Image (cartoon, coloured by chain):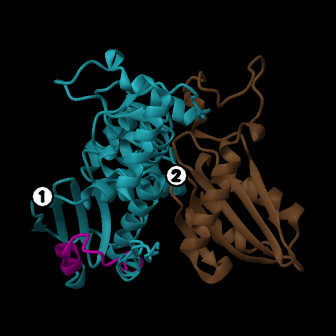
Amino acid sequence: MPGIDECLLEAMRLPGARGAALVDWTSGLALGVVGEFPGGDAEAAAADVAELARLAAEQPAFAVAPAGDPGPGGPGSTGAADDADPSVEDVIVSNRDGYHLLRFVPAAFDSGAVLHLWLGRAEGNLALARIRLGEMAGRLVLG
Amino acid sequence: MTVTQAPPPLPMRDKARDRTAEAAAREGVGGLSPMLTRLAAERATGVLVREGGALYLAGGLVLHAESPYAPGIGTLLTAGGVLPAEEWWRAAGIAGDLPGTARLLLAGGRLTPAALEICHLHALYDAAYFALAPSSSPGRFHYGPAPDADGPLPAVPVAAVEREVLRRRALLHRLWPDALLDGVPLLRSTPVAAPGVTTRQAAVLSLADGVRTAPDIALAQGRRVFPTLVEVRRLAAAGLLGTPPPPGAASPPSELPDVDPHIALLKRVRDALEAL
């Protein structure tokens, strides 16, 4: 069973991987960083990742529609205990230069953790990376 | 004949001062605690006890932090249902200290190392935020024995903790510039055109009863305190959360001026501008 660094090093073995980080999306803190960071500043990159992850996690449009409920996020919505995990699984951003994969880490506690993998455009295999990152995120906390 | 006078110059922000503060925040030397800086420089080992909490130091690293305002690693793990509370306390009873407890739980296979590391870092930074909050009384340092070197929990350099505390303060300040909300009782207010809230925010609002503070709400939920502080500031900015009136004041329902949403909004804008 891996620790944070082992998981990030495993992610770095994916083809085209340039950098990997585990970020707390509620605060923007980098819990672990391996490899390069976009823009060269690990803290700034983590804050940007957290911002994007928060947007994706909180917008009702991206949430799984619960059966028989008009949607979460209304003023009347009740604080269920199951909201520690956002229903969004991952967020993918691509640009001319590369891909950014954000994968929410499922956990039974309030982890707020999201895996961020930066792939080079030429060597990166987005489909493979998405599958592998999903597996890693699943194993990270749940074992 | 009318004489046009040049208007008086507009007040300028002291950019130099702002920059210095920002630079200080970046460097991590913002006078958080001169004592901590000195202890880190001499690589002291022991416990720094301040008003808001305690930092466990060794060789320029923060091993662990505790605060009565931040749920500890045990609370975070057991409240979420990752671990039954009895199991945590049994391990803690046998081991006697945090690294030992962590080692026992890892050996029992109940937790992944990453889960423990994540929880530990969350608890450490959350407690450090309160431990390094501005305080009226000086801190005390108790020198102690060096801990075992190969603990399973990650330690963090003092400078990184200082930088993160300053970054978090700035983050909260940007959301709603009222640091008092970190520690005072909170009460939900009822604006006329309430904006939508997230599930997390709704959970915070449902616990804001005029008695609980933000740390109380986090404890009641078994959640980390910093995300709760973030939600409290966002809710305050949205006008959904405030502080209850002092006991001597009129009861809130009969207070007429606040009923007018426009006046309430103007008051919030005024408060926000004054706090800048």
What main secondary structure does the magenta stretch of the protein show? helix
Marked residue chain, label 1: B
Q: Which residue is mark 1?
A: B136
Marked residue chain, label 2: B
Q: Is residue B152 visible?
A: no
User: What kind of residue is marked 2?
Assistant: Ala
Which label sits on residue B115? Answer: 2
Q: Sequence order check: which comes first, mark 2 or mark 1?
A: 2
State the SS at label 1.
Answer: loop
Instruction: Identify by letter the chain in cyan.
Output: B
A64 part of magenta stretch? no
Mark 2 to mark 1: distance in Å?
36 Å
Viewer-side residue, B221 vs B116: B221
Instruction: Place residue B19 in its image quadrant.
Output: bottom left
Report the residue at 42% width, 28% height from top: B188
Q: Name the mark nearer the viewer: 2 or 1.
A: 1
Q: Which residues are magenta?
A: B24-39
Report the residue at 36% width, 20% height from top: B256
Viewer-side residue, B251 vs B135: B251
B28 part of magenta stretch? yes
Quadrant that contains the C terminus of chain B: bottom left
Residue A11 point in image, percent of width and height: 71, 68
Seen in the picture, residue B233 relative to B172 is either above or below; the reply is above
Residue A55 point in image, percent of width and height: 67, 50
